Image (tube, rainbow, N blue to C red):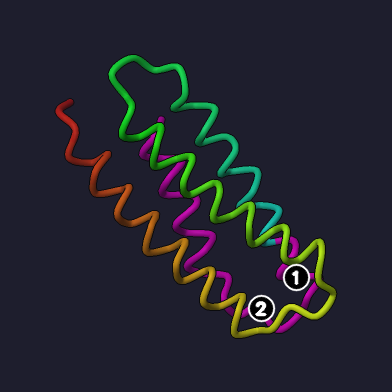
Amino acid sequence: NEYLLITEIKTVSQVSADQCSSRDSALKVVDTLSLKGITFVNYTEHLPHNDPAKKAAKELNDMISDMRKQYIDNPNVSTGYCKIKLANITKSSETIQRTIGAKPR
């Protein structure tokens, strides 16, 4: 479900800052986030009455895709960039979690 997917994205981004010092390790984290982000988009895109989640999923996935592109295009991504992007992904994920969690069940 949506809540599980966004929780997985948040968790990966939360626990991975220590991987930022190694390009190879950071790229593995980004690849994992990319897969989860695309899955989140795919899950939300055809559900009826789900436009806010669909929009949030796309925006979060765009953020993850930008990070991945930076790692693909640039062999010298800084540790600081990685940590900031992961923190931003965590914060966005938390906002989305709150929104999805507030939906009536």
Q: Is residue 42 above or below residue 90?
A: above
Of residues 67 and 87, the one drawn nearer to the viewer in this rendering: 67
Q: Which mark is residue 94?
A: none
Quadrant of the drawing holding the N terminus: top left
In the rendered image, the residue lying farthest to the right is 75
Give residue 52's position: percent from left, percent from top.
31, 34
Q: Secondary structure at mark 1?
A: helix
The rendered magenta stretch, by its main secondary structure, is classed as: helix
Q: Which mark is residue 20?
A: 2
Quadrant of the drawing holding the C terminus: top left
Residue at the (75%, 64%) spot, across then down: 27
Give residue 61's position: percent from left, percent from top.
54, 46
Label 2: few (<14), some or many (≥20) within 10 Å?
A: many
Q: Which residues are magenta?
A: 1-28
Q: Is residue 104 above or below residue 69?
A: above
Give residue 82's position: percent from left, percent from top.
61, 75
Residue at the (41%, 40%) spot, across then down: 4
Question: Reading the chain from its start, which is encountered first: label 1 or label 2?
Answer: 2
Label 1: few (<14), some or many (≥20) within 10 Å?
A: some
Q: CA distance from mark 1 to mark 2?
A: 7 Å
Residue at the (47%, 67%) spot, across then down: 14
Give residue 21's position: percent from left, percent from top.
70, 84
The amino acid at mark 1 is Ser
| Displayed quadrant of residue 95 | bottom left
Relative placement, left or right, of 97 versus 55 is: left
Disc 1 to disc 2: CB gap under 8 Å = yes
Q: Which mark is residue 25?
A: 1
Q: Is residue 68 above or below residue 88?
A: above
Tell me if residue 10 is in the magenta stretch: yes
The amino acid at mark 2 is Cys
